[in-house]
């Protein structure tokens, strides 16, 4: 296989979180010429070179300016601070221009976590599928409706533009780049040295918290509590409406106002949440878990689990091993 590495230019901005920054430095900046020679050449670039203060007060020596991005083979934009994302603070125009120039010059453009907001602002994600940390996917969609945001995946490879989900998903994407450039064997060796999986099954859907209704919403609490306590049974909207003391039609309307979804869709999400909890906290058989959460059979649970979470129940249990207990007295 032809060795393809080249120059990786890391766009460093003031206030940038260290975690995603360190991912790119560790993977591309650590000399691993024993695995592939030449290895990547990492260059730290900033709008105002020399010293750039990152999050938590760390100061980096950034010897290159942003013009170096246009000369790079790969450009990596790590995450923005949460404050910058939530406030909608615009990116430095110099960085946006440099990214456009690098892309026009044939560079591969990569964002980690919320770095996708910079790529979107530069117009590099228009009409493309992309992702970011699941906490911010709705914000990215709202600000840049021309971007096809996928909240469930760990990363998206659109060829010359790649984006990763939040935090450690940046490792997944960087290993994917090595796998693309140098082959699976070298990517696997790098993963072993970093003590991380070479490839994680599923997407970030398995890490997303299941939303719950707001408390005290127009008398729904008793019906919701009753449904949760009887989740192992086949429940209907009529039964839930009876407990809420309203008609099924009124229940559906109030439910949508309170949760943004329907009673049965909410119940389905709660069943999956119960299954996830039991997979994490017990060693109960999958068949028994499917019964306790109202999914019926193990095959049915597997089907809905893969559709919602992206992995099988067994793969999820291996990913999130907890303190297993054979019996849960609180489980109905």
Image (cartoon, rainbow, N blue to C red):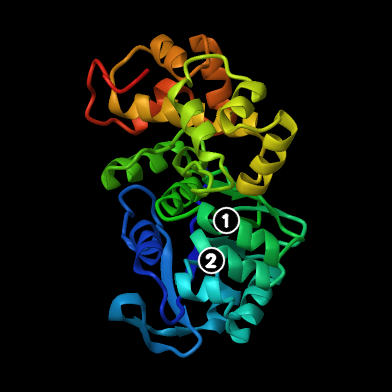
- Residues tagged 2 and 1 counted as in contact (Cβ below 8 A): yes
Other residues around mark 2 within 10 Å, as few (<14) / some (14–19) / many (≥20): many
Q: Tell me the SS state at disc 2.
A: helix
Please state the horizontal and vertical placement of residue 114, each as a whole percent of the image. 52, 63
Q: Nearer the viewer, residue 235 or 245?
A: 245
**Residue topped by disc 2:** 115
Where 92 falls versus 282 (above or below)? Answer: below
The CA distance from mark 2 to mark 1 is 8 Å
Residue located at (29% from left, 28% from top): 281
Residue located at (58% from left, 63% from top): 116
Total labels: the figure holds 2
Where 179 falls versus 78 (above or below)? Answer: above
- On the image, which quarter does residue 161 sit in? bottom right
Q: Is residue 166 visible?
A: yes
Q: Residue furthest front?
A: 245
Please state the horizontal and vertical placement of residue 324, each as a whole percent of the image. 23, 24
**Residue 90: which numbered mark, if any?**
none
Please state the horizontal and vertical placement of residue 270, each as a whole percent of the image. 50, 31
Q: Nearer the viewer, residue 196 or 237?
A: 237
Q: Earlier in the sequence, mark 2 or mark 1?
A: 2
Other residues around mark 1 within 10 Å, as few (<14) / some (14–19) / many (≥20): many
Q: Tell me the SS state at disc 1.
A: strand
Residue located at (43% from left, 24% from top): 229
Q: Nearer the viewer, residue 130 or 8?
A: 130
Where 152 falls versus 126 (above or below)? Answer: above
**Residue topped by disc 1:** 163
Q: Viewed as shown, does residue 107 lie left or right of 199?
A: right
């Amino acid at each position: 296989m032809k060795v393809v590495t080249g120059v990786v230019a890391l766009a460093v901005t003031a206030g940038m979180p260290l975690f995603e920054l360190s991912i790119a430095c560790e993977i591309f900046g650590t000399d691993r010429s024993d695995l592939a020679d030449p290895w990547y050449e990492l260059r730290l670039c900033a709008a105002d070179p020399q010293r750039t203060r990152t999050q938590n007060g760390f100061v980096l020596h950034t010897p290159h300016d942003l013009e170096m991005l246009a000369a790079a083979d790969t450009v990596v934009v790590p995450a923005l601070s949460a404050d910058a994302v939530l406030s909608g603070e615009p990116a430095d125009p110099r960085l946006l221009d440099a990214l456009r120039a690098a892309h026009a010059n044939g560079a591969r453009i990569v964002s980690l976590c919320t770095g996708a907001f910079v790529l979107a602002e530069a117009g590099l994600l228009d009409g493309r599928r992309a992702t970011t940390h699941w906490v911010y996917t709705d914000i990215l969609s709202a600000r840049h409706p021309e971007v096809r945001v996928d909240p469930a995946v760990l990363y998206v490879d659109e060829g010359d533009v790649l984006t990763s989900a939040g935090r450690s998903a940046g490792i997944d994407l960087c290993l994917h780049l090595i796998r693309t450039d140098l082959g699976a064997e070298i990517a696997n060796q790098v993963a072993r040295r970093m003590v991380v999986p070479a490839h994680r099954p599923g997407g970030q859907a398995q890490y997303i918290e299941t939303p719950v209704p707001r408390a005290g919403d127009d008398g729904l609490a008793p019906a919701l509590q009753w449904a949760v306590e009887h989740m192992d049974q086949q429940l209907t909207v009529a039964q839930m409406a009876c407990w809420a003391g309203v008609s099924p039609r009124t229940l559906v309307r109030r439910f949508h106002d309170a949760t943004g979804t329907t009673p049965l869709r909410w119940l389905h999400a709660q069943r999956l949440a119960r299954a996830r909890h039991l997979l994490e906290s017990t060693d109960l058989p999958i068949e028994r878990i499917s019964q306790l959460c109202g999914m019926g059979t193990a095959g049915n649970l597997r089907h809905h689990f893969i559709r919602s979470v992206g992995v099988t129940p067994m793969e999820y249990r291996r990913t999130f091993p907890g303190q297993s207990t054979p019996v849960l007295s609180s489980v109905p």
